[in-house]
Image: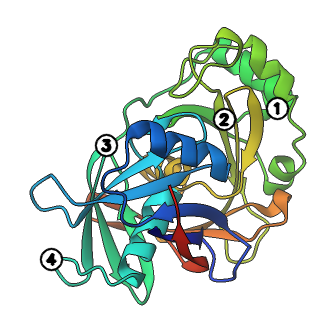
Amino acid sequence: MRAFKQVDVFTADPYCGNPVAVVLNAEGLTTDQMQRFANWTNLSETTFVLPPEAAGADYKVRIFTPDVELPFAGHPTIGTCHAWLEAGGQPANAGTVMQECGAGLITLRQDAGRLAFAAPPLMRSGPVDEADLAGVCAVLRIDRSAIIDAQWADNGPGWLAVLLASADEVLALEPDFGAVESYDIGVVGAAPLGIAGPTKIGVAAQSAANDAAIEVRAFFRSGGQAAEDPVTGSLNAALAQWFLADGRLTAPYVASQGTALGRAGRVYIDQAGTDIWVGGDAVTCVDGQVSI
């Protein structure tokens, strides 16, 4: 039996954020066993905690969707760190946790009980060409004129982010997930119907929520399944790098996500020098053991 927790991330209230499954002592498990268990949990991500291998790391984590392993993902990073600390993990440096993952070393900090990770470098950024935007419009079922701006926002998951005029427009979206099947963006993940990777489109706009500067939604397709992610750390990290760099927003600010799904996710963005910090609350909802 292995220690297991299911953690709700980007919320202080259980069942209002984005859950991640965490297997805390995963030594001895094969990649196939990890992938099979992640497929069984059927959550957007399941993580497996291992002893660190890299110098300076407090622990190593492997992150799996139901279909593939990811080098990095945001809410699993915060959820795994929360579970590790709650289970008695002791970082080498008080107040700072160093996570090793496929994307390298990720620094997390503890601030008044809230965890935040340093946004990893973008693997791809910059403007999106009109051919790609035509595909995005088909998925979102909007006119091209509704898109104020767009950027590639790839920090592991291959997000393509578009900016709309208002939170209301974001919340009103009713995507045509079938349009994804005929559109190839070429991002990281399993390939539905011959597509080179799962399509992921992040949408941001000014939020109507009193505490939030922007409203975010994230749509993706993986392994033939189309879905909306409740709250997305990687996407919000990339959006922060975009919006802070071009002056659309100033830090600190709060992003709202999950509203359209009946969730109440909140992502806290801050900046210190050149580092952008992506923070959120986390709460354990399931605590026990699992047999793998």
Task: Looking at the image, tell me whether mark 1 or mark 2 is earlier in sequence order.
Answer: 1
Task: Looking at the image, tell me whether mark 4 or mark 3 is earlier in sequence order.
Answer: 4
Task: Looking at the image, tell me whether mark 1 or mark 4 is earlier in sequence order.
Answer: 4
User: Which residue occupies the extreme bottom position in the image?
Assistant: 112
Residue drawn where x is 44% and y is 87% of the image: 113
In the picture of the structure, the residue carrying the numbered disc 4 is: 92
* Mark-to-mark CA distance, 2 and 4: 37 Å
Q: Residue 10, how many percent across, how many down?
A: 59, 70
* Mark-to-mark CA distance, 3 and 2: 21 Å
Give the residue type at disc 2: Ile
Cβ–Cβ below 8 Å for labels 1 and 2? yes
In the picture of the structure, the residue carrying the numbered disc 3 is: 103
Reply above or below: 149 against 78: above
* Mark-to-mark CA distance, 1 and 3: 30 Å
In the picture of the structure, the residue carrying the numbered disc 2 is: 201
* Mark-to-mark CA distance, 1 and 2: 9 Å
Cβ–Cβ below 8 Å for labels 1 and 4? no
Residue 90 in view (yes/no): yes
Of the two numbered discs 3 and 2 in the rendering, the one whose residue sits closer to the viewer: 3
Where disc 2 sits, the SS reads: strand
Task: Looking at the image, tell me whether mark 3 or mark 2 is earlier in sequence order.
Answer: 3
Give the residue type at disc 3: Ala
Task: Looking at the image, tell me whether mark 2 or mark 4 is earlier in sequence order.
Answer: 4
Q: Residue 3, how many percent across, how many down?
A: 45, 72
Of the two numbered discs 1 and 4 in the rendering, the one whose residue sits closer to the viewer: 4
Cβ–Cβ below 8 Å for labels 2 and 4? no
Residue drawn where x is 25% and y is 63% of the image: 59
Reply above or below: 191 against 234: above
The numbered mark at residue 98 is none
Of the two numbered discs 2 and 4 in the rendering, the one whose residue sits closer to the viewer: 4
Give the residue type at disc 1: Leu
In the picture of the structure, the residue carrying the numbered disc 1 is: 140
